[in-house]
Image (cartoon, grey):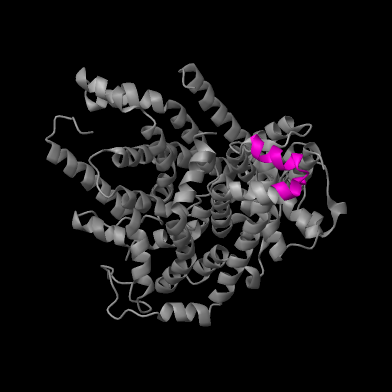
Amino acid sequence: MKPATAGWVFAAPALSVIGLFFGLPVLAALALSLTDFDIYSLAHIDNLRFVAFDNYVNLLRNPLFWSALGNTLYFVVVGVPLSIAVSLGAAMLLHSKLGLFKPFFRTAFFAPVVTTVVAVAVIWRYLFHTRYGLVNWVLSWVGIDPVDWLGDPHWAMPTIILFAVWKNFGYNMIIFLAGLQAIPEDLHEAARIDGASPGRQFRHITLPILGPVLLMVSILTLAGYFQLFAEPYVITQGGPLQSTVSVLYLMYEEGFKWWNLGNASAVAFLLFVLMTAVTSGLMWVARRKGVE
Amino acid sequence: MNDSGLSPRLAKAIVNGLLIGLAVLSLAPLLWMFAVSLMQPGEASAFPPPLWSSSPSLHNYHELFSRMGMGRYLFNSFLVSTLVTVIAVLLNTLAGYAFAKLAFPGRERVFRLLLAALVIPAQVSMMPLFLMLKQLGLINSYAGAVVPGMAGIFGIFLVRQYARSIPDELLEAPRIDGAGELRIFFQIVLPALRPILVTLAIFSFLGAWNDFMWPLIVLSNENLQTLPVALASLSREHVQDNEMMMAGSVVTVVPVLLLFLVLQRYYLQGLLVGSVKG
């Protein structure tokens, strides 16, 4: 076997799996989203009809789709910057020469990342329980009345955002830490001798050098946060008053609760288009600002 | 952070205070989960909530395994995650090595296509994939849960990045001696890739163990459910029993935490190969 033949033979199994169980279904989803595939088609394929863009049009007319989109955007717009800020803050603390026991702290901050989202969501729901949750108890020390975290439509999404930040910040922290460690120490040294304050050093040295890492982390985090599903599924079941129904939650219910698979495929594609648009937009802005 | 005009001792106190605070926030929910899992039924439904049981016991764990079938879910999770890990490590390694070291026609084009496909969220494929597996009779089977995870673009990419550092001479010498490509792969390439294989294995295992949406869709049969799916349905049906739920969470979370604690060097290294150098 020549190396060139071996190359194809070695790559073929993985490529077949990806093609058959990912590539093909993605293309099929596009076709499926143009049909009215539902529980009747599931029973008998003759019931399937081509409906062109009806699913998309109907979705854009469906108030629930817009509120799911709104909830998802809320989660992304508040959650992503908060998550990145905490990650960067934690990375700078770990990078500081003043910190002690750094391997311990790094492991502690990272532990939530590897936990199973469903299991820790169950904990979260309990911590934020109105009556006997630990969070309301701690708040009562400083005289704050019990908050109905998960029962009040105004508080449910913020609670889920806090959960997501707690769960995920360690991931980006590791990447930021590597970025910080790659900055030559003499740059800060020189700035210090010239009398630059830590704030100015951060703005004029750390942030610009970290720019490409920041861009990449933002794109990865955006993509991840657009796919909000397990958290509302376990913590709030989309409630209260559908305030935590996300786009993927809607897709799941459409597809696998009501068996409107054509409709659900259209939801998935709209989400994909939105994600692509937002991340491309971010990259365009970054390029104009001279990052990367 | 050490020249802010603050005295060095104060700066040091602030940095370490913040580190401790953040560590408490990170770990408290996990420690609390463990503490509540040892409480008697109903004990945690008090205000203020007790921080430690007055008579800690393994009662909830015993109930979970004897009455709720937790052993079954634990087995399902281990089986699915192990199968995914073994198959994905093998297939991704073969492909990643091929993309790095074996020049085959169309290689660059296929690789670019793979990288482009990375931006497509897995959920887009789920509806047709479900229908496909239904046709194949694989819904409610372990195979149905395993199949989509058997290879992944990220895994191929990870191996490729690492395999590029293998010197060509190491592969050329045995070729001249007449060794077959498979033999070269198993005797030279695999040992050289060992660190990244460990990384890939941890990623695969953690990914499969923690996965929720796909197993939720494909494993509706209670006997086949993995831990996250079983835990989610437990929490929807018996929401009241917090102590039991916490014990279930402990069982679900502890295996992956242990895996990470023991092998964190490999895990964190993989995180950086996959992101910064990307």
Residue at image location 73% in from the left, 50% down from the top? B183
Q: Is B177 a magenta residue? A: yes
**The magenta stretch spans which residues?**
B168-184
Residue B12's quadrant in the figure? top left
Q: Position of residue B217 (x, y in %)?
A: 65, 59
Q: Is the stretch drawn in magenta largely helix, strand or loop?
A: helix
Q: Position of residue B162 (x, y in %)?
A: 58, 40
Task: From the viewer's side, name the closer residue of B173 and A50.
Answer: B173
Quadrant the N terminus of chain B occupies: top left
Quadrant the C terminus of chain B occupies: top right
Residue A34's quadrant in the figure? top right
Task: From the viewer's side, name the closer residue of B37 and A135.
Answer: B37
Residue at image location 52% in from the left, 42% down from the top? A224
Q: Is residue A132 above or below residue B168?
A: below
The answer to whether residue B54 is seen in the rendering is yes
Residue at image location 31% in from the left, 55% down from the top? A147
